[in-house]
Image (cartoon, helix red, strand yellow):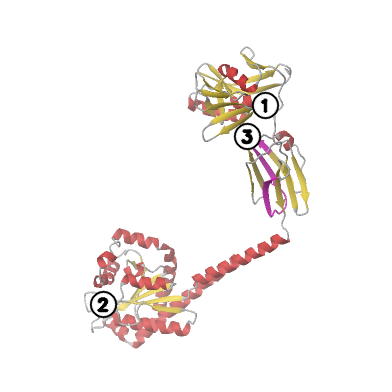
Amino acid sequence: MRFSALAALFVLLPAAGLTQQQNTVDLIFENDRTTARSAGAFRHDGLLYISLNDLCEGFGLRSYESTDSRKLEIKRGNARLKVSAENPFVVLTDQTERRSVYQLPVNVIHAAGTYFVPLELFVPLFERISGRSSSYQPATNAILVEGSTPSFEVDIPTILFEPKVNGLVIRVKASRPLRDFESWLRQDGWLYVTIAEARADTQAINRLKTDGMIRRIVAIQTPTSVQLTFKLSGKIAASEILPDDHSDDILISIRRPGEEDKILLERKRQEIRKGLEEQRDRWKLDVIVIDPGHGGNDPGTTGLNRTREKDITLKIGLKLGALLEKEMKDVKVVYTRKTDRFVELDRRGQIANENNGKLFISIHCNALRQKPSSVRGFEVYLLRPGKTQDAIDIAERENAVIELEEGYRERYQELTEENFILVTMAQSAYLKSSEVFADILQHELGDHLPIPNRGIRQAGFYVLVGAAMPKVLVETAYLSNREDERFLRSDTGQEKIARALFNAIERYKEEYEKLLEEGREIGVR
């Protein structure tokens, strides 16, 4: 009898509206009254229900459950009996394979993985499948069955162990073909084997002595399968389950690590090392994209002395590129423009992506509408919706260039305020690196330029949207301020800005590739 199933059943009874009176019914075999088996039972609406699963077990019959359709089938020879959960109909096929359908006055109850039928109403039907005359005796609460106590039919009577030079073969003895089985070896040494639609002598298997590679065996019989669990000792290279070609037995091979495994392990390590090197090369900071703002028919902002932003940004960009090409031989320099020409904002990001850029620097000059102005200094911007009005105003001014582009309404129609926030969130993978570079850049500019440091800010610059890489936009100084304009117009000022940008790239590259190298060393240990 399944005591665990019954225990679970009586927890579920109140929810199902069933009587909570636990009971069992004994199975007494006339020729062996000293041995009694029992089946779980309970009363509901004046009827005594008995576990059909327990009846099958007590009579030594096989039962098969379809959990999807919630049907239970009992077999003896050609005879079959089928019941369905929450259904009153019983389908009976006799030994001549003649099929009959009977209707019980109540439904079959399915609870705790067990099928319950009304005992007194079902006993006559059960006689047809069991082949034994049976009668329920209410006075003794027992079913009297003719004949002797049946022996259980088992498919798996025992297990044998066959040591091998490089491991062990577990032979699961089978009395008939068993085709539905699987195994799973855990890293902690537990091997789990499931054999569906089979019955095993679990008591005999659990009594087997273990030694060598097998430290423990646990065999459990469930209504639908046999669960075999083995605790293995030592290092295990692999396990495999397969049918024996010369019998109905199931073989489980367990192999310890050997020379071949060491070779395979070293080969795997080499593949991992090669993959890490390829990833490291892929992410190496080897392409810098310089984006001189504005150009062509877009002059950008203008200074007090008619200094045009597009001219200053191009000169600084070319000077920065020359430094990189001279002092960083392993870095490829990509320009969004090298001449006084107009480049659409979205095209600048495309150029960066097409060249597999690893860092995008957009160079600009700032200005206020009121000229002259006392406001001066440089600012470093990250791509995020602006928090301050100043940042919003600057972004609006820089973004206004799209109106010079042909068909700009269609090209930028998706960049509504809500969508822009979503776009910037989608590029969050590069935000941390962008923040690191922005911090390095503001310190280098602050240390080498004779103008104020106005810090790191955030704003929604369209030019930064398309570049799928770490990126910043730097407003080098204010053309609306006399001192800043003078500094920006001078060759010395442009050189200092270019050198500060170069120093920031150099520092960022050292820190960035140091992290890549550390990651490579950890990965190949």
Crowding around mark 1 (Cα neighbors within 10 Å: few <14, some 14 to 19, many 20+) is some
Q: For this rendering, which residue is in front, 266 or 154?
A: 154
Left or right of 59? Residue 320 is left
Q: Residue furthest left?
A: 370
Q: Is 523 situated above or below 169?
A: below
Q: What is the three-letter code of the residue carrying label 3?
A: Thr
Give the foreground label among 3 and 2: 3
Give me the residue at 38% from left, 60% from top: 425
Write down the residue under mark 3. Answer: 222
First in sequence: mark 3 or mark 2? 3
Q: What is the three-letter code of the residue carrying label 1?
A: Gly
Q: Position of residue 422 (x, y in %)?
A: 35, 59
Label 1 sits on a secondary structure element that is loop
Which numbered dot is residue 60? 1
Q: What is the three-letter code of the residue carrying label 2?
A: Asp
Which numbered dot is residue 298? 2
Which numbered dot is residue 168? none
Magenta-tinted stretch:
219-243
Q: Main secondary structure of the magenta part?
A: strand
